[in-house]
Image (cartoon, rainbow, N blue to C red):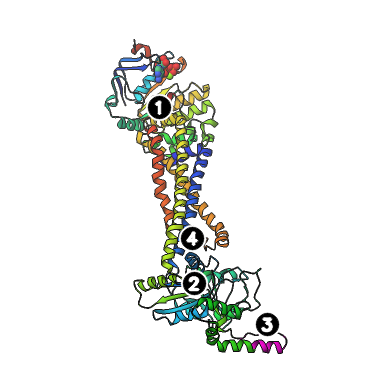
Amino acid sequence: MSLLLRDVKKSYREPGGGRLPVLNVKEYSLKAGEQAALLGQSGGGKTTLLNVISGIATPDSGDIVVDGVNLAKLPEPARDRFRAERIGIVFQTFHLLPAFSAFENVLLGMSFSGRANRGYARELLERVGLKERLNHKPGQLSVGEQQRVSVARALANHPKLMLADEPTASVDMANQNVILDLLRDTCREHGVSLLLVTHSPEVAGLFDRVDQLSDFNQPE
Amino acid sequence: MNLFSIAWKSLRQRWLASSLTSLSVSLGVALMVAILIVNGVVDQMFSQTGSGYSIIVGARGSRTQLIMSTIYRMDRPIENLPWRYFEEWKEHKWVERAVPMNLGDTTQEGGFPIVGTTPEYFLIPPIPDQPFRMKVEGDDKFNSTWDAVIGSQVARKNGWEIGSEFQMVHSGGEGHIHDEKFTVKGILAPTGTPNDRTVFVHIDGFFALDGHDKPVEEAIERELKFYPSESRADIEKRYAADLADIRAHAEEEASGGGHDHHHHHAVSDLQKEVTAVLVTLKNDDYGIRAQSLEAEINEGIQAQAARPTDVMGRLMINLVGNVKDAFLVLTGLIILVSGIGIFVSIYNSMADRKKEIAIMRALGARRQTVMLIILSESLLLCMLGAVIGLLLGHGLVFFGSPIIEQRAGLLIDPYSYNPWEFIVVPIMIAMSALIGILPGLTAYSTDVAEGLQS
Ligand SMILES: Nc1ncnc2c1ncn2[C@@H]1O[C@H](COP(=O)(O)OP(=O)(O)OP(=O)(O)O)[C@@H](O)[C@H]1O
Ligand SMILES: [Mg+2]
């Protein structure tokens, strides 16, 4: 699934009252099945960019075309549905639901698209090494384990576009490789486009394509 | 996962607050159930019984007391009337049946009220078109002095059968127990009226008991007062045969030595009395005769008359109705307050849940979906409260009914239910919608990006 951003602008209202421009992207694109690592300094707007792409945040202006559909022009319910069915997100801060077990969190990743598959949820958790932690609540998991649950959840709805915000920031070397392999292999197998934010040059080094945010983003 | 299981999980996460709020609802519902059931019983009791009689005649006093004692057997009888007055009623040209009734004693076992009456009592249906039926019938029913017929509850509670013998406790005194024994000759089928917890003894037996025949001198005095136009001579002349009998008997006893307590002579009409006369009228479809008879008697000085339907209707409206309304309003308030409790609990939790809601939205949940989840939580809390409340309420009735029966003489089937109970279902649905709407709208309008950062 291809991704194309054109003239995308996003600014935040500042506590002082003015506006803080964060994004101003003339053009940025990803081909179907392409995998790219995205580097950028802290506070540079990486998370904001991913939020705008997934429709979690609305841009001030511009087009976000995913698989030929301009999300910026789509009414909200349709955009929600699009996100539920075709976009997988690994959040920088995981965003697991505390009331639900690891297994249920993964199930929730599928529920809103109406395609819950318990077998697949279990399989994904096994693949990130959490076979023994299915029924633990997020509060009963280590930080790295929580991150792995969030990766499994992002894969749960068979997305066509995967947005991963530093998915390996909190795990050790062994698990970093497990997560990266799982993400990259699954995406490759199913022709999923992957945009992965990282601070680690080592992680970025694994990717054929590495983008610097500041190269295509010039907020004033 | 469906919306309900998602809602259920969030409720379980906050289990303490959830169960406390549910509990408050359940208390309201339990109270409502108990009140509805008691209401139903009171309703049935005060709307059905006694309407089989056109009028009831008793000693002067409160008409309500007359009805409470004769129909419900819950109040002390007022005073007694002379037998002669009862016989006049029997002769009255409008009267179809006049049945004597004597009240005041109770059974030694179980403390059930005892009614002394004639077999004719059972010929008047206690509820229109629902005549008395015998569940078990003895050979010679209710025809001789020591025969008794008992209500279904009496049979059940005391375990009495045909042939069981019992004694009665005399009213007024310090619980003096009559020596004489009555024998159960019939058991009534349940009627849903106070007859079910009544013991009927043959009026001849009732009179034969010690202290149930009025001393001669008192009886004459009373007749003088009751029939002011007659002189003592008139009365002595009327009862000449009786008086001669009594005198002969007294002499025989004085000379014949030892007084045989168990030897019963026929009680003279002079010494007999009745607590009330139950009257049905001929050709009185519209109750006009009953009304005019009632007015006529109440203008006189001898007795008072009450039309059961009239008194019971007023009782129902003025007393029972008001108490009932007050209770229902109270229950409504309790449910309302617990509803506000649920609202506060859910609404408070919304601040913490902004993030959860944003996460679900980020996972693709639509605005309506998160709103429905909150509404489901509200519905679950209310329904849970309702179910627990229904169980609790019936528990209350189950364990409380024997106590109420003892204290108030109200018979409540421990397993009874009132069809109106199921009104809690629509009430709870409406209430949960009302409670959930504001938090639901909060969820609906949550900004995803902002919520994720909070
Ligand atoms: N809700 C907001 N209101 C105002 N400013 C915001 C808001 N969210 C983010 N910002 C600002 O926008 C900038 C970009 O934030 P963003 O989270 O996209 O950075 P990032 O590149 O993901 O950083 P990091 O690598 O630390 O995660 C930051 O300077 C931040 O202060
Ligand atoms: Mg970030």
Tag 2, which secondary structure?
strand
**Who comes first in sequence, dot 3 or dot 4?**
3
The chain ID associated with circle 2 is B
The residue lying furthest to the right in this view is B257
Same chain for the residues under marks 2 and 4 in the image: yes
Verify CB contact (< 8 Å) between mark 3 and mark 4: no
Q: Nearer the viewer, mark 4 or mark 1?
A: 4
Alpha-carbon distance for marks 2 and 4?
Answer: 35 Å
Alpha-carbon distance for marks 3 and 2?
Answer: 31 Å
- At which x and y percent is residue B229? 48, 79
The chain ID associated with circle 3 is B
Q: Horizontally, is B221 left or right of B385 in the view?
A: right
The chain ID associated with circle 4 is B
Q: Name the residue under label 2.
A: B58
Please, what is the three-letter code of the amino acid marked with disc 3? Answer: His
Q: Mark 3 points at which residue?
A: B261
The chain ID associated with circle 1 is A
Q: Residue at x 50, y 40 (%)?
A: B18
- Which range of residues does the magenta coloring cover? B249-265
Q: Name the residue under label 1.
A: A89
Judge whether B344 appears above or below B213 on screen: above
Question: Is residue B438 something one can see in this rendering?
Answer: yes
Please, what is the three-letter code of the amino acid marked with disc 1? Answer: Ile
Judge whether B317 appears above or below A79 on screen: below
User: Is the shortest distance between ligand 1 and the CB of mark 3 under 8 Å?
Assistant: no
The residue lying furthest to the top in this view is A220
